[in-house]
């Protein structure tokens, strides 16, 4: 007589693993769809498409890690700035490539002059982001970075959580001072432009999904 108990046990374990995988897959898809709906309100109905995500419960908030790339970040940054700043950001463009570049025009001595500000991103321990100026090209003018940043700070009206420090020669993106209407917040985790690896945490209060 053949003992089939071992086969039944193995088959049961196999089916159990498949069901667990399907449940996790459905949960992940649900999270992505829900997150896209939450973000669509300020991205002109354009949702972020993260390459991967995971979430854990941290205190009273859900914490997501988004792994994305320069192409996605370029799209999201410019959509947000155009919608948030509207005409105040008209004529300016942010390009994330080997460095972070801000392009636009400055009024220098009464003339509108095209400029390109090239910055290196530095993730701070608190999740904020410093964009440290490496060089600036202002038409045919040769202006020191500090002076050019001072002129830019007077002509470009930015949200309070984005500040230009002309003395230290960087732009601070203070995510700790920013939140969406549903109290969703962001923290930068990693920016490696050479490897095209950009990661950030999304913090969502439990009240926002109740």
Image (tube, rainbow, N blue to C red):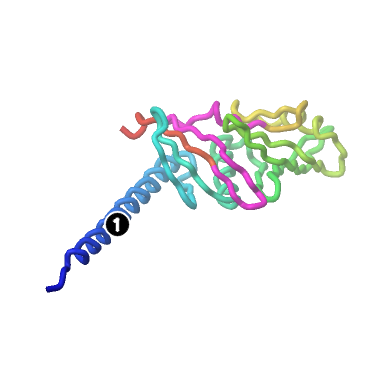
- Give the residue drawn at x 43%, y 45%: 54
Furthest residue in direction bottom, as rendered:
1
Residue 174 covered by magenta stretch? yes
Residue reaching furthest to the front:
1
Residue drawn at point x = 80 percent, y = 30 percent: 146
Element assignment for label 1 = helix
Q: Position of residue 199 (x, y in %)?
A: 55, 44
* As drawn, 163 above or below 77: above
Image location of residue 160, percent across then percent down: 60, 26
In the picture of the structure, the residue carrying the numbered disc 1 is 17
Q: Nearer the viewer, residue 55 or 206?
A: 55
Q: Residue 80 falls in which quadrant of the image? A: top right
Question: Is residue 159 in the magenta section?
Answer: no
Report the magenta residues as a range.
172-199
In the visual, does 169 lie left or right of 185?
Answer: right
Expressed as whole percent of the image width and height from the top left, the position of residue 70 reads 60, 50
Within the image, what quadrant is residue 145 found in? top right
Q: Position of residue 165 (x, y in %)?
A: 72, 27
Residue at the (70%, 42%) spot, across then down:
102
Does 51 sit above or below residue 105? Answer: below
Crowding at dot 1, Cα within 10 Å, few <14 / some 14-19 / many 20+, comes out as: few
Q: Nearer the viewer, residue 166 or 11?
A: 11
Instruction: Tell me if 199 is positioned left or right of 166 in this view.
Output: left
């Amino acid at each position: 007589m053949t003992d089939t108990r071992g086969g039944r046990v193995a088959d049961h374990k196999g089916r159990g693993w498949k069901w667990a995988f399907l449940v996790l897959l459905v949960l992940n898809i649900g999270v992505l769809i829900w997150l896209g709906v939450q973000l669509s309100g300020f991205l002109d109905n354009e949702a972020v498409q993260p390459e991967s995500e995971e979430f854990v419960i941290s205190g009273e908030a859900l914490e997501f890690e988004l792994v994305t790339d320069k192409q996605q970040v370029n799209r999201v940054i410019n959509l947000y700035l155009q919608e948030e700043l509207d005409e105040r950001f008209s004529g300016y463009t942010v390009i994330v490539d080997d460095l972070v570049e801000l392009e636009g025009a400055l009024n220098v001595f009464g003339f509108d002059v095209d400029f390109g500000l090239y910055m290196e991103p530095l993730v701070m321990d608190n999740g904020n982001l410093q964009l440290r100026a490496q060089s600036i090209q202002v038409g045919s003018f040769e202006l020191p970075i500090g002076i050019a940043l001072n002129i830019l700070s007077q002509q470009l009206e930015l949200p309070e959580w984005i500040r230009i420090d002309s003395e230290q020669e960087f732009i601070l993106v203070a995510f700790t001072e920013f939140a969406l209407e549903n109290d969703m917040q962001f923290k930068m985790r990693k920016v490696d432009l050479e490897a095209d690896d950009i990661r950030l945490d999304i913090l969502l209060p439990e009240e926002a999904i109740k």
